[in-house]
């Protein structure tokens, strides 16, 4: 199979390439990157005025299978990822049963081989059943293919278990992904604690709920030398803590999600349950701090925390509806609109946070376009303007707060291992 991409703006942060080039893919590999390629090909993609980037990598996705297939499956989640431009996704372990042993890891990997159209990397849990009471057999799971450990959806409340998990992860050379939430401070909160929660008469979630665990885990990773990745940072102090952790030599990275640099808790005044996520939408100052953290490099990665829920679940009252929104298909347009168009990030800086940075955290040979590399490639139209329509999502669920939002930027093609797994024009027919 020969695939020729013509005349696109190649953006490759790992080599600082930002030029119009042709790219020839042969049998799943990048064969040539030149100013003009005249070779014959089985298919030619006209990428003029488009960005051609390494395949996007999402470190934080909930595929829900096994156990919650009414929300999402590995198949539908992978198709949603492809439509969003992601060629590699990491699936969190809060399934039923949890991804806490080799049997469940093997199930996820097997189902991904059969059904997924993108690369699916399972994350194993730190503790058995995500209960925080005893460590899972991490070494056993690493042997058959987990990429990281996390109790995401929950937090390891016991610092001893978290430290022991970090020590094992360091020995096995995998990262620890931390969902930061001190459950003793939660007090039944359903949204950010502040003026809006008071106005609505709802229990609030303090910033300290998140910040306390971020601080704890930075201290633990400084002591153990483990690679710590802080998930879905939403607070201004959280950004400062990551910045401080890096300044003292802690091996820590951080991610933010598009909803946390796009929306604030004032959007919850609508009582739209699609505005309910965890961590919650915070204040204007937090959004500003996140954008500054992205700009100055404190925040390494943009991830989606794709969390699908069935419409009946999100139809409950705000207090009773589950936390979470889908995010795979809106990440690129929101990031281009809010960060590139508004001058916070250059195209190169943006793509870095979707590609080479997450690849480095996982220590995988992805996020790069060079001759000889596996041909995982995303092609993006950065300037097209349109309204997001959740009814067109490939995801099984439609719980997005961005329906009808006007955005710039759209994925045109997603290529995995040299094969087109998403073609916007063809797949929209």
Image (cartoon, rainbow, N blue to C red):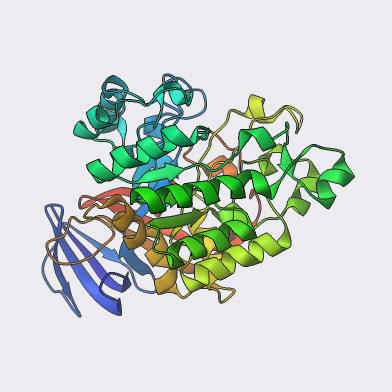
Residue at 25 percent of width and 63 percent of height = 368
Up/down of 170 relative to 315, above or below:
below
Residue at 54 percent of width and 53 percent of height = 257
Left or right: 359 in relation to 183: left
Up/down of 388 relative to 152, above or below:
below
Picture quarter containing residue 261?
Answer: bottom right
Can the viewer see residue 389 in this picture?
no
Residue at 26 percent of width and 70 percent of height = 6
Work out whether residue 29 or residue 352 is closer to the camera in this orientation and state it: 352
Residue 120 is situated, as x and y percent measured from the top left of the image, at 31, 39
Work out whether residue 245 or residue 417 is closer to the camera in this orientation and state it: 245
Residue 277 is situated, as x and y percent measured from the top left of the image, at 63, 41
Residue at 59 percent of width and 74 percent of height = 342
Residue 205 is situated, as x and y percent measured from the top left of the image, at 71, 42
Residue 348 is situated, as x and y percent measured from the top left of the image, at 39, 73
Up/down of 355 relative to 167, above or below:
below
């Amino acid at each position: 199979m020969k695939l020729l991409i013509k005349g696109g703006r190649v953006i490759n942060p790992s080599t600082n390439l930002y030029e119009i080039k042709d790219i020839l893919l042969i049998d799943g590999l990048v064969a040539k990157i030149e100013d003009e390629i005249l070779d014959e090909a089985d298919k030619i993609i006209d990428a003029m005025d488009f960005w051609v980037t390494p395949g996007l990598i999402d470190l934080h996705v909930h595929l829900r299978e096994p156990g919650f297939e009414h929300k999402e499956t590995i198949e539908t989640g992978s198709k949603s990822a492809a439509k969003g431009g992601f060629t590699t996704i990491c699936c969190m372990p809060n399934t039923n049963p949890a991804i806490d042993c080799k049997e469940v890891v093997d199930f996820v990997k097997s189902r991904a081989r059969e059904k997924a159209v993108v690369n699916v990397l399972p994350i194993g849990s730190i503790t058995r059943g995500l209960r925080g009471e005893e460590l899972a057999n991490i070494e056993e799971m690493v042997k058959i293919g987990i990429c990281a450990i996390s109790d995401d959806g929950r937090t390891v409340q016991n610092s001893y278990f978290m430290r022991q998990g970090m020590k094992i992860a360091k020995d096995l050379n995998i990262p620890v992904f931390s969902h930061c939430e001190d459950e003793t401070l939660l007090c039944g909160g359903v949204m950010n604690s502040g003026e809006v929660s008071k106005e609505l008469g709802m229990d609030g979630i303090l910033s300290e709920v998140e910040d306390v665990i971020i601080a704890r885990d930075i201290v633990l990773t400084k002591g153990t030398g483990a690679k710590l990745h802080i998930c879905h940072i939403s607070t201004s102090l959280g950004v400062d803590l990551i910045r401080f952790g890096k300044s003292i030599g802690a091996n820590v990275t951080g991610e933010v999600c598009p909803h946390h640099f796009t929306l604030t808790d004032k959007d919850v005044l609508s009582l739209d349950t699609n505005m309910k996520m965890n961590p919650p939408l915070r204040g204007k100052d937090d959004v500003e701090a996140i954008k500054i953290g992205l700009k100055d490099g404190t925040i390494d990665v943009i991830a989606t925390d794709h969390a699908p829920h069935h419409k009946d679940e999100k139809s409950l009252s705000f207090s009773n509806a589950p936390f979470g929104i889908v995010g795979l298909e809106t990440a690129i347009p929101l990031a281009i609109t809010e960060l590139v168009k508004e001058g916070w990030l250059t195209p190169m800086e943006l793509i870095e946070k979707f590609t080479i940075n997450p690849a480095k955290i996982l220590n995988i040979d992805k996020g790069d376009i060079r001759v000889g590399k596996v041909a995982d490639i995303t092609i993006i139209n950065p300037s097209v303007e349109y309204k997001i329509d959740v009814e067109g999502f490939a995801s099984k669920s439609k719980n997005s707060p961005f329906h009808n939002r006007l955005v710039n930027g759209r994925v045109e093609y997603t290529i995995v291992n040299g094969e087109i797994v998403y073609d916007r024009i063809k797949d929209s027919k």
